[in-house]
Amino acid sequence: MKKHLLSAFSLLLVGTLVSAQEVAFEEYDLDNGLHVILHQDNSAPVVTVSVMYHVGSKDEDPQKTGFAHFFEHLLFEGTENIARGEWDQITAANGGRNNANTFLDRTYYYEVFPSNSLEVGLWLESERMMHPIIGQVGVDTQKEVVQEERRLRVDNSPYGAFFEQLLKNLYTKHPYRWAVIGSLDHLASATLDDFKKFNKTYYVPNNAVLIVAGDIDSEKTKKMVTDYFGPIPKGADIKRPDIKEDPITQTIYAKYHDPNIQIPAILLAYRTPGQGQRDAYVINMISTYLSDGESSKLYKKLVDEKKMALQVISVPIDAEDYSSYVVGALPVGENSIQDLKKEIDEEILKLQMELISEKDYQKLQNKFENMYVNANSSVEGIANNLAEDYLLKDNTNLINTEIDIYRSITREEIMEVAKKYLKVNQRVELEYLPEQKDAN
Amino acid sequence: MKKYFVLTVLSLLMTASYAQIDRSKQPKPGPAPEINLKEPARFELSNGLKVLVVENHKLPRVRIQLTIDNPPILQGDKAGVSDLTSSMLGKGSKNIPKDDFYEEVDFLGANIYVGDQSAFASCLSKYFPRILELLADAALNPNFTQEEFEKEKDKILTGIKSEEKDVSAIATRVQTALAYGKNHPYGEITTEETVNNVTLADVEQFYRSYFVPANAYLVVIGDVEFDNVKELVTKYFTPWSKAVPPSFTYSDPTDVQYNQINFVDVPNAVQSEVAVENITNLKMKDPDYLDALLANRILGGGSQARLFKNLREDKGYTYGSYSGLRDNKYSPMRFSAYAQVRNAVTDSSVVQILEEINKMTTEPVSAEELANAKAKYAGSFVMALESPETVANYALNIETEGLSKDFYKTYLERLQSVTAEDVQKAAKKYFSTTNARVVVTGKGSDVLENLEKVSFNGKTVPVLFYDKYANKTEKPNYNAEVPEGIDANTVLEKYIEAIGGKSKLDGVESYSMVAEAEMQGMKLELEMKKTTKDQFMQDVKVMGNSMSKQVLDGDSGYMVVQGQRKDLSAEEIEKIKEESSAFPELNYLAAGNVSLEGIEPVGDSKAYKLKISDGKTAYYDVETGLKVQEINTQEVQGQQMTSTLGYGDYQEVSGIKFPFKITQNMGPQTFEFMVKEIKVNEGVDASDFK
């Protein structure tokens, strides 16, 4: 009997080892509402300290767009204890690096350090949360920087307005309808009080998650977290209006002329479920199957075999309330964007009418597993995933279980979801064209 | 009620407990972290293969790395055989054809690489058994065929050919050949001749001799179980026959007796490659290893280092200047400090590099430099530890370099304890400014005169001469006298006569050209149209899509670069007008402001050098009179950019000779345009310039 038990136990062990991907973590709240997630992994003396704030472009006043992204810049300007311009110097002198990014639903700040500088990281991030300096000098400086960034990334960049144009056509009520970078006019006319108010509303501990990942001593770290973040006062509860879009029932045709391009593009965009939902995972698989990378169906057909397209585009935009799936292509030579649309539609139709082959399905599974594994190959990646899983998908443990969702998706489900969401009459067709010139 | 009270007190206590920290100052970093390196588990096969297994179940993936730690191999008159062997491995096996092999690896989402003395694979752990099997099969049962051999040999020969005039390639070759000697494994030169000496049988022999388990280490790291690895590795690698590689004798490289410049004349060079080198004897296990690394980092380890700051930021001589210190347990190695510099500052760069090295040996580095170098080193050392490859390499280094078990565990501590004196001592030991060999590869006619005047520490540094294959040679003779009666006008007239004569050229009102080149496997198409009425159009297409286009129509014009259109400025219009005339020599002759600068070698023949403007020189063959080369220099964002156009294969169209082969060198890139079509007075329409 005892022997039997033992072998059952060791069998179990083998079982966990085979599917092993155990990112151990613990999570708790401070009194001020700050959610803390610790991931201890002492295999390398590296530590990531990061804070994700639950504020993105969707939280902006429609008359004051671009604020969330602007804050990402502003909050490197210094705090009551860190002088202007010192943030980067402190990071470098400790052998580390830092950065930040903003999206529709959230803003993320992080530092990566050798683990003996953990406390420096906690100090930096708690300073940013506790008392950043929001003053005229910083605001004026960063207004310039953000204007330059918009010019560089959107206005003067070939195909730079893709994102903005798609969102604008795909959403009519939901604040996803404007781009993260927002409007330069809104920013230019914003006052110091507007910024202070935005900070007071969203940059509060009860609207954020702190991640400390890597080579830490969990107990000591908890103490330091309390020391640095505990004194930060809790903010008011945040109200988020629940805005629902009416379904698209007739194809929305749109055109945009980009002065920076010569080769047109066709873009087909679908509104799909929010990122936590099962169907969103299926859409991700479809996106990969159709248009991600050189072994995808559309790339092989349009670029390799028929040589009709210069490039195939796939932009799955994951977000909390709705996701968006965009597929498109740039023609080569004499081919028109209408020809490409026909070819893409043919492939989507196939997906809706037939099961994908067993071999393609298995290859897809292998691809997802690889992507999933590599996303967690550094503490920097793990910290980011922990933050998003908690903040945007309400389940921190997805870091360990998300792959099971992909594994459980069947070929039949792929067909069903393609049928349900990728209908021609439910999409935006954006013709993204070079600027027209008068014939001469 | 009571319970409630206790809780309140507790929370009060907690509030009190976080009031102690001082936020006004940056917290001090703690002591250097201890490195928790996994101790690999080991076993050895009966054939001598040593296996290291690092279990790491954090991620369900595995990396497999095979290193064969053979002493350096002397290839002699068959130099290139190791490259050839390498390029033929990892392409299927005797049991599985190449295409099937690639497809299976792709399907599994894995990577497999096999080199002549190494192999590597990465995959999800569930495919580990199959990937290990495929790797072993490809490594142990290679399918060497005559067909693949010819294909790979052609590739290597093409590579050698394309580097014939490549100044960087010549410079590197001569630097190593002079430092180590041509009969040393690290100094021998692979040439067309030695590659042609290699047969398929030599490749098979090379593989049999050196791809052997005597010095081989297989490292498996990731989500695996030791017992399972042992079973599978034993199964797949036991068939590997036991053998020891042949050994060689060759003499160790030594330093030169006194400081000297070794000059290699490359007439087509538009920049000089300068490298100051000496021989060092550094091994990882040496106690001053870290001191030496820090010395090198402070001297030339990046954009914060002295060489970069001096030669680029302060003097603007170069785009970058760095130094490299190499360690090796088998052989003394080369230390070098180097830069690619403008011709005019070649001599000054030599002096500056020598001065910087000298300063390292005579003065202690500043506390700030030392602290920053340490922070950078510590930071990158620590960050690198995250990658499983690094962990594997460390385990391997401890094994193969004879390091102490705690070498990496104490790495950061030892790094922190290095002092400025230690760094200076290491600099004195490993850098030399008394027995330094300064290899300069460049255009002698431009740089040699000043180079011969270089003095350092009060002594003139003698110049010795070498050819492109590091053989001693005579000083080149640049004083090819321009014959009596020859001036710029006679050169231009001879050229015009050679291509068809003035009356023929005057009759040309328009012409169009289509040419093609290959760029990384893609077709590059060049279309150009010109008329005598200041009309010009040039369109460069990549795979049928326009990448850059310039259009000029009289006094207005525009250019489109990667989809971005921009009108030309007045200055740009003037420039293009100069270029756009069908035969600019007619204008030069009329204007009379061109000067004859002398005779210089271009390729294998001699050419008259005409200075057209400050940024442009043109070369006309002394014998044929034809234009063979044009060099354009311009300043782009503060950097001197030089582009060289070579003209060849002249063919007649409508009675006029046009070059049908145009080579363009710009920085590291070379394009060879082959002309497909030239039309004179047809095929050009006014609408082409709209």
Image (cartoon, rainbow, N blue to C red):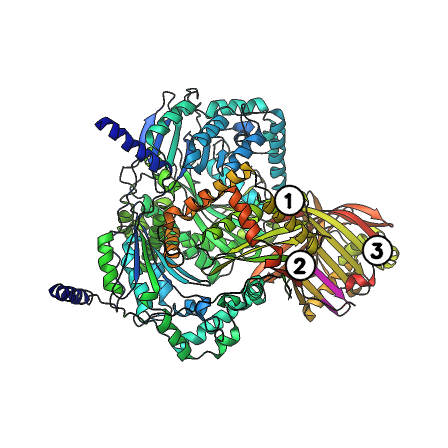
Query: Which quadrant of the structure image shows residue B55?
Result: top left
Q: Which stretch did the figure color magenta? A: B549-557
Please state the chain letter of the residue tagged with numbered disc 2 in the rendered image: A
Q: Height in image: A29 above or below B396?
A: below
Q: Which mark is residue A264?
A: 2
Q: Magenta stretch containing residue B551, yes or no?
A: yes
For mark 1, name the chain. Answer: A
Residue type at mark 1 is: Lys
Q: CA distance from mark 3 to mark 2?
A: 28 Å
Where residue B614 sits, quadrant-wise, is: bottom right
Q: Main secondary structure of the magenta part?
A: strand
Per the image, the residue denoted by label 3 is: B683
Q: Please state the horizontal and vertical placement of residue A417, each as a whole percent of the image.
A: 53, 50
Q: Please determine if labels 2 and 1 lie on a single subunit.
A: yes
Residue denoted by label 1: A301
Do the residues indicated by labels 3 and 1 lie within the same chain of the protein?
A: no
Disc 2 element: loop
SS under mark 1: helix
Query: Could you say which is closer to the camera, residue B15 or residue A391?
Result: A391
